[in-house]
Image: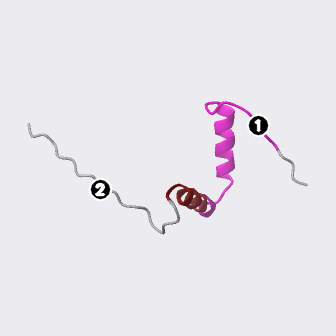
Amino acid sequence: MIKKIIKKGSINDDFIKNADMEHWATKSPQERVETVEILRRQFSGSTKRLQRIVRVVQLKQS
């Protein structure tokens, strides 16, 4: 049986920050990278690579 646990608190709450850090500390580096990849795909689509964006800025000469 899976027990559902919900903890409510402010995002600035130290308890929430510590719980998040403890959760990710238990994951392997490979699991963390896979999770970042899933989040990246959700945000930017299913492209294989990150988009490269270049912006040229002209500086004023002194």
Give the magenta range. Answer: 5-32
Q: Secondary structure at mark 1?
A: loop
Quarter of the view holding residue 32: bottom right
Which x, y percent locates residue 54?
29, 56
Marking on residue 54:
2
* Extreme residue toward the right, this view: 1
Spot occupied by residue 62 in the image (x, y as percentages of width and height):
8, 36
Q: Depth-wise, is mark 2 or mark 1 nearer the camera?
A: 2
Residue 61 coordinates in the image, percent (x, y): 9, 40
* 50 displayed left or right of 46: left
Q: Residue at x 17, y 46 (%)?
A: 58
Determine the residue positioned at 56% across, 57% down.
42
Nearest the viewer among 53 and 20 is: 53
User: Does the magenta run of residues contain 14?
Assistant: yes
Compute the Cα span from label 2 to label 1. 42 Å
Residue that mark 1 sits on: 7
- Which amino acid type is shown beneath numbered disc 1? Lys
**Could you classify mark 2 by the number of other residues whose Cα lies within 10 Å: few (under 14), some (14-19), or many (20 or more)?**
few
Secondary structure under tag 2 reads: loop
